[in-house]
Amino acid sequence: MWQRIGAMVFKEVRQMLRDPGTIAMMFMFPIIQLLIFGVAINNDPRHLPLAVEANDNSQFSRAIVAGLRNTSYFDVTEIAGRYGEGERLLAEGKAQFVLTIPTDFSRALVRGEHPQVLLTADATDPASTGPAVAAVSEAVNQALTRELSGPLAARVAGPPPVSLVLHRSYNPEGITSHNTVPGLLAIILSMTMVALTAMSVTREDEQGTMENLLATPLRPIEVMVGKIVPYFAMGFVQVLVVLAAAKLVFQVPFVGSMTLLLAVTLLFTLVCLALGFTMSTLVKSQVQAMQASMFYLMPSILLSGFAFPFRGMPWPIQWIAEILPPTHYIRLVRGIMLKGWDLRLALPESAVLLVMLLAFGTIAVRRYRDTVA
Amino acid sequence: MSEVPAIAVRGLTKRFGARTVVDNVDLTVMPGRICGFLGPNGSGKTTTLRMICGLLIPDAGEGEVLGLDLKTRRRAIKHQIGYMTQKFGLFSDLSIAENLEFIARVYGLDNRKVRVDAALERLGLDSRRDQLAGKLSGGWKQRLALAAAVLHEPKILLLDEPTAGVDPKARREFWDQIHTLAADGMTVLVSTHYMDEAERCHEIAYIAYGVMLARGTIAEVIAGSGLKALQGEGPGADRLGAQLEALEGVEMAAPFGTTLHVCGPDLPALRRAVSPWADRITFSEAEPTLEDVFIHLMKHAPDHSVLEAG
């Protein structure tokens, strides 16, 4: 019996070593996982972009900016006295926090009136806001304590000199599902569109039906379009299901334009299909197609900002994540659904997706020939 | 008849990397003829068929299929060619009728339903039209594949080892069908390993290691080889093969049942070689078989490659 088991083991190892996909999986998976979980994922993100809207250009507001800069939590940009600028930065996603210092701030502070400052947070991703909010309050009061010296030292005694008012924009209650459910659109589409297309194309090769198809007057582009259309329809149904669930089950707010959302979803679906097709031209079997889609899906789920805060990742990983289509689509979905992005705000991310579509589309069409071998 | 060949290719060559799989092949088939395409495994039969039907682009050579240039009119050629692949090329997860409907749609045929029904009727598959193609036995799969390949009434039919793994009765019926189609004017180029099938063809072409070694009718090919054969009968005749093959003048010696078939290029030399056994075994002159010719050709063919062609 042992000899027979040994024969099986020996054969299995030989086959494994002969298949580059399996070897890649064996070594790359642990490495990628280690990188992602060990390095990339950080639930206490630092260096978050924070804009200070200092309507009161005083020594105190300058001290606050300096104090915030000293924490590792924020990368501070100062935008003194331009009213409404902070809100714009927040909407565009260029800042995650805006600290608004009111006009009569220093006067009120000196008078000991415990003035309020407003911290507006982009709470579309509540996980990345939490720890940072506590840091703001701490930093502001520490900075002012140093500043309030001499005759003003009395202001430091008792309750903190400044009280912080927190406003969670776009997701006031900090509900996690408001963040994850829109993100799921990207993940579900990536999973089904990429993997199914890749496998459906390789199936024709594997079962020998491709040769038959190509011997008929069917053009490669016709085969491609014919294959894409049903999956495209399926993707559309998936989108409707997720959107219905978002509204009816999870009560995710939808403040933007449905038309715009469907438009960018269409774009993203095409990117996925083109990517799946490109993948299918690079692999030889359905098993390899499955492995290739796994390699794509894992980082898509973990790095795109779906599962973990995007800004928590070190910049090289963020850069890698920028190459993944779901990263851009997730921003678009969250932007449109939760922040009410209009076409102008949605344009930059959509442009990235469009470039990806053209790139993958070109590769797929080029590599997909009407001859065998 | 002012005959324009259905297939006329000259100097057809295909290389995969450094390997020349098809080397300078000429082939002409006249309309309504059945041409058997023979050769050992990996000799370039499939590659040649694929070049003729536009699935591969030749690296060198030229030709016309139905008067259309092989290189520039691939699309037009595809409309008029039926190609039955070596491996079952229809969809296992579609029913028989669905497969035929798909093919009819792809070729943009009119009266789709009528054609599919007629094809099912001809196949005798009308009662099983809703059965999945993948569930059919080898013989039925082959019938279905043929029906699909001729559904659009092509002028040329290319068959790549169509009867591999099919039982004798089904093979017989298959060939009857091929002859019926040819009688209606269809030109057929069929690759095969079976000698009995080669004998059913109007003419044959023999290719080995990518090189065309013989062409013509069976009688022409046999005569052209210059081989002579003897048949030995007597006690233990069938056991002498190995001993005889070692002798000068004997190219092959193979048992056929209890008799021995010996052949070589020269009759007197052959007779001299078998003379030591003449006392107990009677040797009489026999007709060389096609198989003799092919093995003879293979032995003398320059071996370009021992690798199997893709």
Image (cartoon, coloured by chain):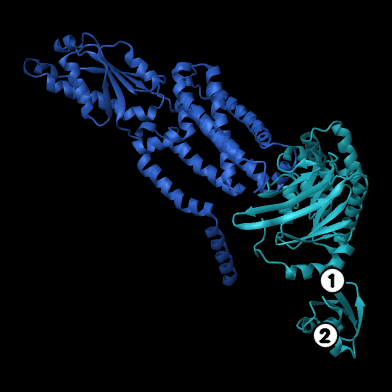
Chain colours: A blue, B cyan
Residue pointed to by mark 1: B226
Q: Residue at x 55, y 24 (%)?
A: A243
Foreground pick, A105 / A318: A318
Q: Are marks 1 and 2 in contact (CB under 8 Å)?
A: no
**Mark 1 neighbour density, 10 Å: few (under 14) some (14–19) many (20 or more):** few
Of A106 and B37, nearer the camera is B37
Residue at image point 72% right, 42% down: A213
Residue plotted at (77% across, 35% down): B106
The mark that comes first in sequence, 1 or 2, is: 1
| Residue B41 picture location, percent across and down | 72, 62
Marks 1/2: CA–CA distance: 18 Å
In the foreground, A100 or B266: B266
Q: Read off the residue under disc 2.
A: B273
Q: Position of residue B156 (x, y in %)?
A: 83, 45
- Please state which of residues A76 and B183 is positioned toward the viewer in this rendering: B183
Question: Where B252 sits versus B201, above or below?
Answer: below
Rendered location of residue A218, percent (x, y): 72, 37
Q: Position of residue A78 (x, y in %)?
A: 25, 19
* Callout 2: SS: helix
Q: Residue at x 60, y 69 (%)?
A: A4
Q: Which mark is residue A286?
A: none
